[in-house]
Amino acid sequence: MSRYRFLRTRRWVGLALVVVLAATACVLLGMWQWTRHESRASANELVNANYGAPAQEISELVDDAVPADLVWRSVEVEGSYVGEQVLVRNRPVDGNPAARVLAVLRAEDDDDGERLVVVDRGWLPLGEEETVPPVYPDGEVSVVGRLRQAEPVDSRTAPDGQVYAIEPATVARAAGVEGTDLFTGYVLATTENGAPVDGLHAFPRPETTPGSHLSYAFQWWVFAVGFLIGYVVLARREAADIAAEAAGEPTRPERTTRRRTDADEEDALIDAQLDG
C-alpha cells in the first residue's frame, strides 16, 4: 500500500472530499426522484381504481371531508344552485390558460337538513375579453361529478367574484352564500341533469403516465457510482506513474507519443527560419 501514500496528501484528500460530496448529492437527488416516482405511481393507481366506478349518492360515500382513497370517485348530488358563481383564474387545462367556474349547490341531507356543496362546473378559456360564465340551471338540478379534496386556504385577497383556491368556506363567502353546514371538499361536475354542462368545457381525465422520475433516479445513482469509479481510476494511474518513476521507466505522459502533424512541421519550419 506504500505506492498509495500520496492519497494522504492535501491535494488527494481534497479531491476525495469533493468526490464524496458529489456522490452523496447524486444519491440524495436519486432518492428524491424515487420518492416522486412512488407518489406518482400511487396517484395513478388511485385514478385507475376510482375513475371508472359507477356514481353513488354522495351521502352514501362521505359525511363531511373527502378521504384520500375516495378522490375521483363519481357521486351524485341533488339540490339547487344559490348565490353568485365564482371564478378561479389562471388554472391551465391541457396547457391552455383557463378559468374554472364554481357554484354553490344547496343540497338536501338524509336527516332532512341542508348542506352546501361547492361544484366545479367546468372551465372557460382565458382571452382578451372579460370571462363571463354561463348562468347555472334554475330550480332542482342533479349533478354527477367526481369527489375532490378541498385545497388549502390562500391568504391572498382575490378580486370580487374570484378566489385563488377551491376552499369551500372561501368560495361560499365569495358567492355571497351563508350557511354553516358546508361540505369539506368539492365536486368536479361531469353532467348536470344528465347532460354535459352547457357552455363550459369539461375537464379531461387525469394523466396517468408514469413520467420520467424513475429514469432520473437511476441516472443520478449512475452519476454517483461514476464519481467513485473516476476517483479510483485516477488514483490507480497516479500510483502507476509513481511506481514507473521509481523504477526509472518513462511515466505515462512520456510513453504516449503524439503523431506529428502537418501543423507541427510548419511550426518547426517557421521556428528554424526565425532562428536563422
Image (cartoon, rainbow, N blue to C red):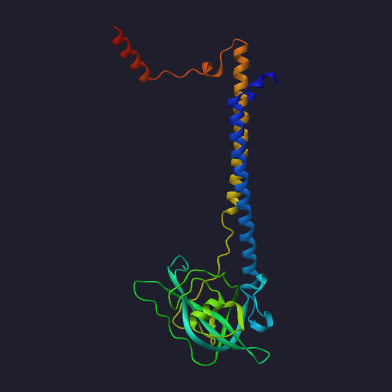
| Residue at x-position 44% and y-position 86% | 135
Q: Quadrant of residue 41?
A: bottom right
Whether residue 13 is situated above or below residue 113 in the rendered picture:
above
Please say if 176 is above or below 256.
Answer: below
Q: Residue at x 62, y 35 (%)?
A: 228
Task: Identify which residue, 222 or 71, lies in the foreground.
Answer: 71
User: Does residue 99 lie above or below 198 as drawn?
Assistant: above
Estimate the x, y position of residue 106 in percent, counting from the top left.
Answer: 57, 87
Rendered position, 219 above or below 100: above
Q: Tag count in the figure?
A: 0
Question: Which image quarter holds the N terminus?
Answer: top right
Q: Residue 57, can we see it?
A: no
**Observer-nearest residue: 122 or 13?**
13
In the image: residue 267, left or right of residue 119:
left
- Quick one: quadrant of the C terminus? top left
In the image, 161: left or right of 71? Answer: left
Picture residue at 34% right of the left edge, 16% below the top: 267
Residue ranking furthest to the top: 276
* Image x and y of residue 158, in percent: 45, 72
Q: Quadrant of the rendered structure where residue 207 is?
A: bottom right
Q: In this view of the protein, which residue sits in the foreground, 151 or 58?
A: 151
Estimate the x, y position of residue 57 in percent, counting from the top left: 65, 84
**Residue at image x 41%, y 73%?**
125
Quarter of the image for residue 21 reads top right
The answer to whether residue 45 shows anywhere in this view is yes
